[in-house]
Amino acid sequence: MATFGTLSDRLTETFRNLRTKGKLTPADIDGTVREIRRALLDADVALQVVKEFTGKVRERALGDEVNRALNPAQQVVQIVNEELVAILGGQQRRLQFAKQPPTVIMLAGLQGSGKTTFAGKLAKQLEKDGHTPLLVACDLQRPNAVNQLTVVAERAGAAIYAPEPGNGVGDPVKVARDGVEHARRQQFDTVIIDTAGRLGVDAELMKQAADIRRATAPDEVLFVIDAMIGQDAVSTAKAFQDGVDFTGVVLSKLDGDARGGAALSVASVTGRPIIFASTGEGLDDLEAFHPDRMASRILD
Ligand code: GDP
């Protein structure tokens, strides 16, 4: 997974400077907070998140816990670490399963965000955990999307429900509904619904996704977002939150040279937890997301 090279280096440098000091003056704290602020903004973290984050760090760093600490600089680093964990969502959140199978998991996100690849990864991981997933191909927008999911399903060794020509083609909502019904009849215990993505947020697409959500009452709606999306992360995430009210986030392409902004912004502005990190093109490149581990990686 990415170590957030530049962001990580800059914070390390900031803390190194801080450690050369003994007692910290308010000016030292302000200087440190300013450097953290600049490093986060340069890493494409959304302004509102940066403001909130640095505000909390500053308030705590000027308070008693640092004043009384044997090692004030170390205490500030600890505060930054705790606040990073908090904006990344705090506790780890696991996938939620239905009491009565099948568990329905719907995927949404922009085209190219890594949805189809993630569908395969999730199916493979679920199988490894003893589940019986069924992939449902509801991206009928792109001519090749059904084929792509079929290939991914084969590689993952998972079953797929895809529309037959002349049977449901053109109606992704019907395919989704039929797919869940098929899973129920054939006793698959999880259903992963891949939906259409477009290059930009688009009202028609959002309505289609909302219709699929209503028709299938999913237990989880996962919003897949490319970690390299940068400053667009917030507006894209908010549009999908308004449109499909997702329950969790999948950060994809965290193996790339992501600057970290999306990771740090999305959970915070949407209040939805990041559940998975997708870290490569291979079907095994999937990790459960741990806010504390991610914070450690950033501060390492
Ligand atoms: P979709 O349009 O949202 O279904 O996106 P795809 O799953 O087709 O992925 C788009 C491209 O990103 C493909 O070339 C994938 O191989 C690649 N991709 C997907 N997930 C990852 C990832 O976690 N890391 C990297 N490096 N590439 C990925």
Image: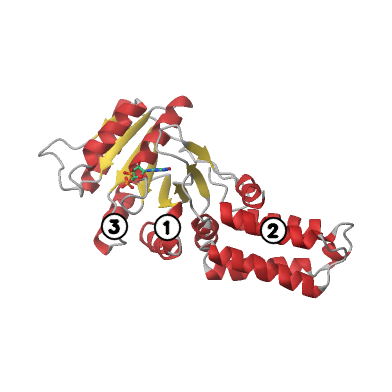
**Is 246 left, or right, of 259 in this rendering?**
left
Specify which label sits upstream in the sequence, 2 or 1. 2
Q: Which residue is mark 1?
A: 229
Q: Residue at x 38, y 59 (%)?
A: 240
Q: Residue at x 64, y 53 (%)?
A: 85
Q: Which residue is mark 3?
A: 199
From mark 1 to mark 3, how far is it between C-alphas? 12 Å
Q: Residue at x 31, y 56 (%)?
A: 210
Q: Which residue is mark 2?
A: 13
Q: Secondary structure at mark 3?
A: loop
Q: Residue furthest bottom?
A: 27
Of 171 and 288, nearer the camera is: 288
Residue type at the position of mark 1:
Ile
Residue type at the position of mark 2:
Glu
Q: Secondary structure at mark 2?
A: helix
Q: Which dot marks residue 118?
A: none
Give coordinates of residue 128: x percent, y percent. 46, 25
Give coordinates of residue 36: x percent, y percent. 65, 65
Of 36 and 10, nearer the camera is: 10
Q: Residues within 10 Å of mark 1 (few under 14, many from 20)?
A: some
